Image: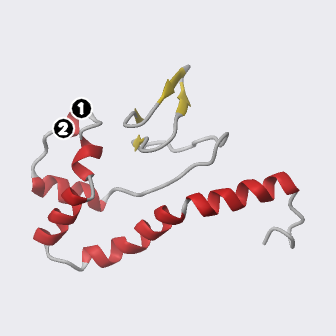
Amino acid sequence: LMETRCLPTALQTRVRKHLHESFKVHRQRHQRATIRCLSAGLQGEIALASGADRVCSCVWYLRDVSQDVLVELVHNFVPDMYSPGEYIIRKRALSIIRRGSCWFKGRILLRDSAVG
């Protein structure tokens, strides 16, 4: 990919780092289809064991939702990752920072901050 497109060395390094760091995110995306095949009860247990309730607690209007609502919310969660220095262009989306930091409207946002 990178050699055939004659990408600069610095960009190749950034791409390799991103692919290495995003392995867990890609694995989570793949596992979503498998989890949807399970019963609602098992999906709820997986959601709680995976920390979906902690993610929801980062957003004031999602705090203390019931397990049924949490399971439905998790169906709409899409794991994503951004590289350092990359612009985040996601309109009509809510993102929770789980690792790293983000510069947003003149403020530095850290883990468990909500953007959007």
Residue at (87, 73) in percent of width and height: 4
Secondary structure of the residue carrying numbered label 1: helix
Residue 99, placed above or below residue 46: above
Q: Looking at the rendered structure, which numbered label has been put on residue 60? A: 1
Instruction: Give the residue at the far top of this rendering.
Output: 106
Q: How many numbered dots are placed on residues in this image?
A: 2
Residue 115 is left or right of residue 15, and the answer is left
Q: x and y percent of residue 111 in the render?
A: 42, 36
- Say which quadrant the C terminus sits in: top left
**Residue 38 seen in the figure:** yes
Q: Position of residue 22 (x, y in %)?
A: 55, 60
Is the residue marked by circle 2 packed among few (<14), some (14-19), or many (20+) residues within 10 Å? some
Q: Which residue is mark 2?
A: 63
Image quadrant assignment for residue 12 = bottom right
Amino acid type of the residue tagged 2 in the rendering:
Arg
Q: Nearer the viewer, residue 55 or 116?
A: 55
Query: Residue 74 shows which numbered tag?
Result: none
Q: Is residue 94 left or right of residue 6?
A: left
Callout 1 amino acid: Trp
Q: Position of residue 25 (x, y in %)?
A: 47, 62
